[in-house]
């Protein structure tokens, strides 16, 4: 859902926005009604008019459209939440920072015999990092961007971890 700030003071409902107009527009833009589908009022209400306006982007960004796209933000979060549920180390494991690339945020989560590596490329350029100090190989649990839902049966050599711009890899260390 897109933040859609009010264009006119008359459209502001938030008291902070009314007091601070036009510099401070308040929270109305962030409190847009939930956009369930591309229908009237984005499926939020059958009433004549919702309290806050539905942005035009609701036709493209809504739950119904996101559900159908396996690489949508909604489905990405669902997969990552499921992964967290399935991997105890991601829920309650100890945290250990790894790697020395200033553009890659990499860490381990360890719980019992399970060790999971998370590496996030925080830059707009592809990066390759050496994480062999962690182990030799890891089984990829999730990779983005990948398409097809971020899953792949891939063994990752930790001596050379390739990350796309703003890419992510989550892997179980062997």
Image: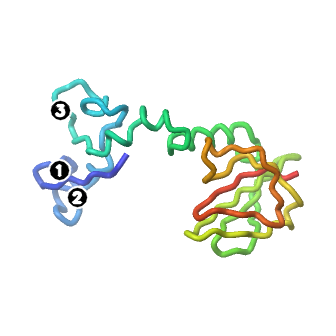
Comparing marks 2 and 3, which lies closer to the viewer? 3
Judging by the rendered image, the residue that carries numbered circle 3 is 49
| Residue 17 in picture, x, y percent from top left | 21, 56
* Farthest-out residue, top: 46
Sequence-first tag of 2 and 1? 1
Q: Residues within 10 Å of mark 2 (few under 14, many from 20)?
A: many
Describe residue 142's horizontal placement relative to residue 157 as left or right. Answer: left
Sequence-first tag of 2 and 3? 2
Judging by the rendered image, the residue that carries numbered circle 1 is 12
| Residue 71 in picture, x, y percent from top left | 55, 43
Judging by the rendered image, the residue that carries numbered circle 2 is 25
Numbered disc 1: secondary structure? loop
- Residue depicted at x 71% and y 52%: 170
Q: CA distance from mark 1 to mark 3?
A: 15 Å
102 vs 65, nearest the viewer? 65
Question: Which of the image's four quarters has the N terminus?
Answer: top left
- Residue depicted at x 76% and y 51%: 171
Sequence-first tag of 1 and 3? 1
The image quadrant that residue 148 belongs to is top right
| Residue 26 in picture, x, y percent from top left | 25, 55
Numbered disc 3: secondary structure? loop
| Residue 30 in picture, x, y percent from top left | 33, 49
Q: Residues within 10 Å of mark 3 (few under 14, many from 20)?
A: few
């Amino acid at each position: 859902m897109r933040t859609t700030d009010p264009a006119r003071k008359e459209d502001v409902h938030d008291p902070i926005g009314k007091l601070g107009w036009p510099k401070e527009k308040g929270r109305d833009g962030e409190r847009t009604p939930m956009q369930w589908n591309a229908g009237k009022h984005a499926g939020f209400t059958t009433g004549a008019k919702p309290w806050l306006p539905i942005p035009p982007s609701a036709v493209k960004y809504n739950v119904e459209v996101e559900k159908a796209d396996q690489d949508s933000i909604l489905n990405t979060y669902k997969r990552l939440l499921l992964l967290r549920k399935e991997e105890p180390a991601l829920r309650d494991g100890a945290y250990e920072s790894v790697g020395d690339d200033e553009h890659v945020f990499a860490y381990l989560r360890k719980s019992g015999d399970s060790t999971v590596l998370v590496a996030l490329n925080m830059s707009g350029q592809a990066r390759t990092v050496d994480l062999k100090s962690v182990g030799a190989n890891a089984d990829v649990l999730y990779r983005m961007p990948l398409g097809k839902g971020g899953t792949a049966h891939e063994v990752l050599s930790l001596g050379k971890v390739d990350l796309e711009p703003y890419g992510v890899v989550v892997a179980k260390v062997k």
